[in-house]
Amino acid sequence: MSDDIYGTVQKNGTVTCLARIVGEEAAAINQSCISTVSYSVFLLDERDPDSRTVISGHDDVSLEVAAVIFNSMQTDPRWTVDDIGYNFRHTIDVSSNNAFTVAGRSYLVEYRLMPVTGQVILARFRLNCI
């Protein structure tokens, strides 16, 4: 079971998503156990939890596994949750397509990690845009 990670993003800004992700066996994932990673950004409808609108330029974007997944836990000033660290980090590229354009609304950043074997792993970030 995984919970959505909540955070804040500035209108027309970007965000770096950090997480400690584990697989089906509750062991931390690493680069060798993940075959593909992609993400999408959605504008959420607060009145209808099943409604979400994908943001142009941020729909099922493929990422290089080695660029976002670490083989060991990382700790730096960005990680304030605990002393163990994170093994996933991605900064949303907004240089060509803004992702977070409506202040006062919520967005969902959904990462789909496909393991070499097993079920898809979802990592989700719910962001309030200010």
Image: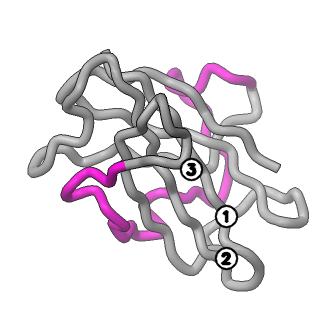
Q: Secondary structure at mark 3?
A: strand
* Label 2 with label 1: CB-CB less than 8 Å: yes
- Give coordinates of residue 87: x percent, y percent: 63, 49
Dividing the image into 4 quarters, which one contains the C terminus?
A: top left
Against 22, is 109 above or below?
Answer: above
Q: Amino acid at mark 2?
A: Pro
For mark 2, what is the residue? 115
- Give coordinates of residue 85: x percent, y percent: 68, 36
**Residue ID at (61%, 42%):** 19
- Residue 121's disc is 1
Against 11, is 69 above or below?
Answer: below
Mark whose residue sits in front, 2 or 1: 1
Q: Amino acid at mark 3?
A: Phe
Residue occupying the far right of the picture:
25
- Residue 88's disc is 3
Decide which of 81, 24 is in the foreground and name it: 24
- Give coordinates of residue 98: x percent, y percent: 16, 41
* Label 2 with label 3: CB-CB less than 8 Å: no
Q: Which residues are magenta?
A: 53-82
Mark whose residue sits in front, 1 or 3: 1
**Residue ID at (51%, 76%):** 36
Mark whose residue sits in front, 2 or 3: 2
Magenta stretch holds residue 33: no
Residue occupying the far bottom of the picture:
117
Decide which of 47, 83 is in the foreground and name it: 47
Sequence order check, earlier mark of 2 and 1: 2
Sequence order check, earlier mark of 1 and 3: 3
* C-alpha distance separating marks 2 and 1: 7 Å
* C-alpha distance separating marks 2 and 3: 14 Å
Q: Secondary structure at mark 1?
A: strand
Instruction: Report the side of 96 relative to 14 (left or right).
Output: left
Q: Are there few (<14), some (14-19), or many (20+) residues within 10 Å of tag 2?
A: many
